[in-house]
Structure formats: C-alpha cells, structure tokens
Amino acid sequence: MPENDFIFSKSIVTRFSHDLAGVVSAVSNSLSLLDELGGADQETLKLAADNADILMGRLRFFRAAFGNEGPLTDIAVTQRIFEDYLKTLENKAIHYACVWQTDQELPIFIFRLILLSGLIAAECLPRGGQITIQAQAGNRQIRVEASGKNAAPDPQMQTVLDGRIEDVSSAKLMPAVFLQKCLAEQKWQISLSSLEEKAIILLNEKR
C-alpha cells in the first residue's frame, strides 16, 4: 500500500473514532447510572435511547458515505440517511433544515457525492442553518448551499477542495480528500465559494 494511502486510511479511522466515541461513552454512562440506581429511571433511559439513536444515525451515514454503495438505492434513502445524520449534530442551540430539489432518476454514484458534500456543508454551519441540495437528472451537476449565521468553509478545507493541497494526514480534512477521490473517479470537479453567510458547493462533470 502506498504511504499516502496508508496515512489516509489511518485518518479515516481517527475521524470515525472521534465522531463516535462521545456517543458510545454517553450510552455507556447512562447504562452505568441505571445500574447504580438499581432500576429504569425514565430520564436516564431516555438519555441512553437518544444517544443510541445518534450512534446508529452516524454509523448508517458513515457506512453509506464512505463504504460500498449498497445502502444507497435511491434519492429517498439518501435523503433519510442524510437528514438522520444532521439530527445527530443538533442540540438545544444548533438545528438544521434540509431542502431537497432533486429527481428520482439520478444515477447511483450521485448519492454518495450528495452525502459527502452535505457533510462538508454541515461543517460550514457552526451554528446550524439550512442546507439546500439541487440535483436534476441529465444536468450532470450538484449544487449544495449552506446558509446560516457565520456560514463559511474552513480555510484548510477550501484548499483541499480547490486542489491546492492533499492533506491525507488530517482527520478533519478527510471527508474533503475522500470527496476529491470520488470526483476524480467519475471525472467530476468541485468548487467551493462563500458569500454573505452562505457557502456554495458546486460539483459537475469536467468538460
């Protein structure tokens, strides 16, 4: 295995472990508290159940976005997986809304690109906001728009998506690097821009 591929695989594991560790710990702590209380306290049970839902939502998303295409059968499944993932990121102060402007006849490879660009869009919204996905059959283009307070792409993420660097060692930048690899496989390209608390990701076929 080439050194860059090996470093990239370690970054993937690091990213997933980081995103899942806190949730697993919360479930474990809730169950430990139940054991100490000697019974099923309703509030603790809800805490455990909520964190278990978060864990499953993230696992399903990671499986679909970074694994084989098996789970991604159509746009409805893609929509459900992505919206369930967004819910795992929410708290009392952060909320997301998702607007879908898509067709049923999209090719299967588009679904992974939607999930990956949607993940990057969510990371452009530190305080939550709205994510709009536009993808029409035959257009060979995907537009993902993130709008909300302080919406802006991470500068390092911008350099990766612009093709100026390929930092395979950073777990934070791993989704952007992986998206670039997926785009190259399909002979597609990406641009990322920001304007007035809005980040716009445009993916399209190279001409």
Image (tube, rainbow, N blue to C red):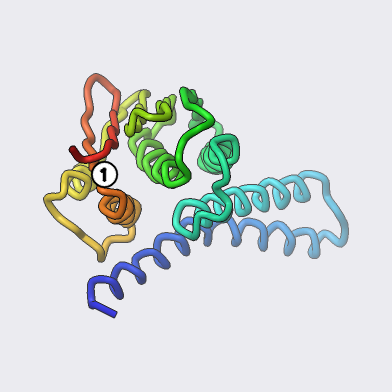
> Within the image, what quadrant is residue 29 found in?
bottom right
User: What x and y, as percent, mark residue 67?
Assistant: 48, 60
Task: Specify the farthest residue to the left.
Answer: 164
**Residue at image location 21% in from the left, 40% down from the top:** 206
Q: Amino acid at mark 1?
A: Trp
Would residue 114 appear left or right of 60 to someone viewing this image?
left
Give percent across and percent down for residue 205: 26, 39
Q: Which residue does the numbered mark 1 point to in the structure image?
A: 188
Question: For the point 22% across and 22% down, which residue is it?
Answer: 195
Quarter of the picture holding the C terminus? top left
SS for callout 1:
strand
What's the residue at 42%, 41% (across, down)? 110
Q: How many marks?
A: 1
> Foreground residue, 41 or 137?
137
Residue 163 is situated, as x and y percent measured from the top left of the image, at 16, 49
| Mark 1 neighbour class, 10 Å CA radius: few under 14, some 14 to 19, many 20 or more | some
Q: Reply above or below: 104 against 114.
A: above
Residue 6 relative to residue 83: left or right: left
